[in-house]
Amino acid sequence: MGPLTPTLIAAALLALAPPAPPVPDAEVEARLRRDVTYMAAPDMKGRGNGYPELETVARRIETELKGLGIATQLQHFPFIAKVVREKQAAALTQGETTRPLVWGKDIEALGLSADADLRNKPLAFLGYGVQIPGGYDDLAGIELKGRVAVIARSVPDLDAFAHLPKGERSLLARLKRLEMAKVAAVVILEDAGLRPLLREEGPVKMEVPVVGMTPEALASACGDLAARLKTIKDTGKPASKDFILAPWSVLTLELKLKREEGQIPNVVGFIPGRDPVLKKEIIVLGAHMDHLGMGERHSLGGAEAAGKVHPGADDNASGTALVLELARQLNKERPRRSILVLHFGGEEEGLLGSQYWVQHPTHPLESVKFMLNFDMVGRLDDQAPKLLMGGLGASKAALVAAQNLVPKGFSVMGDVGASVGGSDHMSFSQAKVPTFFFFTGVHGEYHRPTDTADRINFKGMAQLAAYGKTVAADLANGEIVPAFDAETAKVPMKGDGGPMRISFGTLPDYSENPKGFRITGVSKGSTAEAIGMQAGDIMVQFGDRPVKSIYDYMGALGAFKAGDKAVIQWLRGDTLMKAEAVLKGRS
């Protein structure tokens, strides 16, 4: 499961009177144990994206499916595997004293940084770089253009900052704001130590240089940084203008980065349906194969976990093995509709594999009627066996129908909407495919080296496999499949943190697009629908703000209020379209 912390919204525990539980199948349990143990073994090195071991696992799954007589293929897609410095130099000048900065010790680039060739650019300390119109504002009264903005990486989790919108804590949101202000560069204060140069989530590359520096490396360049940050924390008030500017401290920076591309696999298996008509319709069973490798990114194990294998037994060798088991069983039964088995790469880097498949489907996307996603299904509690289940893009009635299939002694806690976590089902719901998400919960080993196979409840996994098969078969054999529900497909988006007062009504494509922000649809009755936008359009301008990504779009929304007018520009194919929109407030 990816870096998003799973939450449960409006959950309801349903006590049902269902059929008797299936007898645990010792063979199923043994196969699950074998597959999870193989994928979570130390020599698989955590199946990191860009690792050859992930390719090894993909080939193993492909071989298993072929052995069942299932038609298979590997689908590879590009991935920025590594970012390296080709050229670098940095120096800090205070008054008449110039001090070279040591790369990897004093200073390091962020993977999303633009190249740089700056000479003697003045520094401006901006606290956290937070700006809320009419409220907390670290940027108030400061001329930012052409300066090097210095901000702390993390907004503290203190009562004094509890009023800040959740999105405002996002570093990327604050960077995008500074980029729009045309700063010369951004320096991130790395209080917890300098971070290595890695690919960053979000945009592959920003338009301004972004580097991390230790507070010690900046020394007194912005005065007593420690004292200034303490004052901000203690008071909960933004930095005051009288000590922000440091015109006597300037940065010289030369930087050129090279982004090395790798390939990540998806494994595709197709089980044709037996009904001559319904076999044209597809039920997808999905799980992601990848994990965190040696913990370079997203590890929650702290300094002691650095460089250690993150086995990912629950996350998500468990789901991978369970979907492989469902393929074995459903291949024997051959339901009326076709079954598409998808094992994704790149989930931990932002749902890359599932997004790629949706954009480059190996089978007609319009034929996909439902998607079941299994992510972290290995830690069922024997004392209180409970599955957390979300229905993103599925109706409440569809979820209740699935819950009515739950065997005795087993319970399901769930709800429609963004109920549990963020995983590959989101890519399908954005493509207007209803989904169910199967999940047994977060635990203390999540994203740590201790997520090992010996902690997996294989008996519980066998129970889940039986239930998952029941739900899949019900969908694949029914006369009709529950329809997509646009209301339950809505999920909160990571924005730039301004108060989200505007509802515009786009369904986003989260993947990178070189032309702008691509949408996969519009909400009924929304402003986007009213001005004529539709699925596949690429927004390039929102009012006076250029839009190159979803982050620019969210930043633009945060800058307006209900009743404002803005000219929206978008591409439909190669044609530039525009319309004036009267913006609506959020209900």
Image: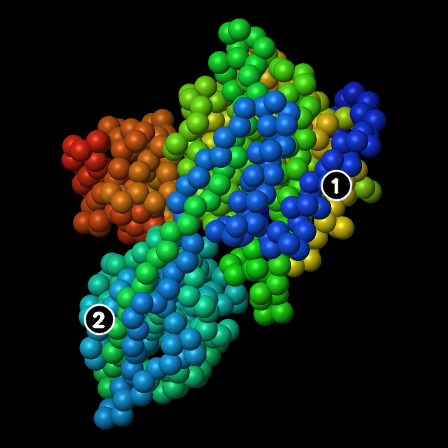
Q: Residues within 10 Å of mark 2 (few under 14, many from 20)?
A: some
Which residue is more in the foreground, 169 or 436? 436
The answer to whether residue 340 is left or right of residue 258 is right
Instruction: Please identify the quarter of the rendering in which residue 585 is found.
Output: top left
Residue 151 vs residue 462, the one in the foreground: 462
x and y percentages locating residue 166 in the rendered image: 46, 55
Instruction: Name the side, left or right, on which 48 lies relative to 408.
Output: left
- What residue is rendered at 26% in x and 73% in y? 254
Q: To which residue does mark 1 refer?
A: 33
Where residue 214 sits: x, y (%)?
A: 43, 78
The numbered disc on residue 117 is 2
Instruction: Find out whether the residues at labels 1 and 2 contact each other: C-beta distance under 8 Å.
Output: no
* Count of numbered labels shown in the rendering: 2
Mark 1 belongs to which amino acid? Arg
User: Is residue 262 visible from the viewing direction of this image?
Assistant: yes
Label 2 residue SS: strand
Crowdedness of circle 1 by 10 Å Cα count: few (<14), some, many (20+)?
many
Q: Could you tell me if residue 419 is visible in this image?
A: no
Judge whether 287 appears above or below 481 on screen: below
- Left or right, 334 with respect to 190, comes to right
The tag earlier along the polypeptide, 1 or 2, is 1
Q: Position of residue 345 (x, y in %)?
A: 51, 43
Q: Amino acid at mark 2?
A: Asp
- Residue 77 at what x, y percent from top left? 41, 41
Q: Nearer the viewer, mark 1 or mark 2?
A: 1
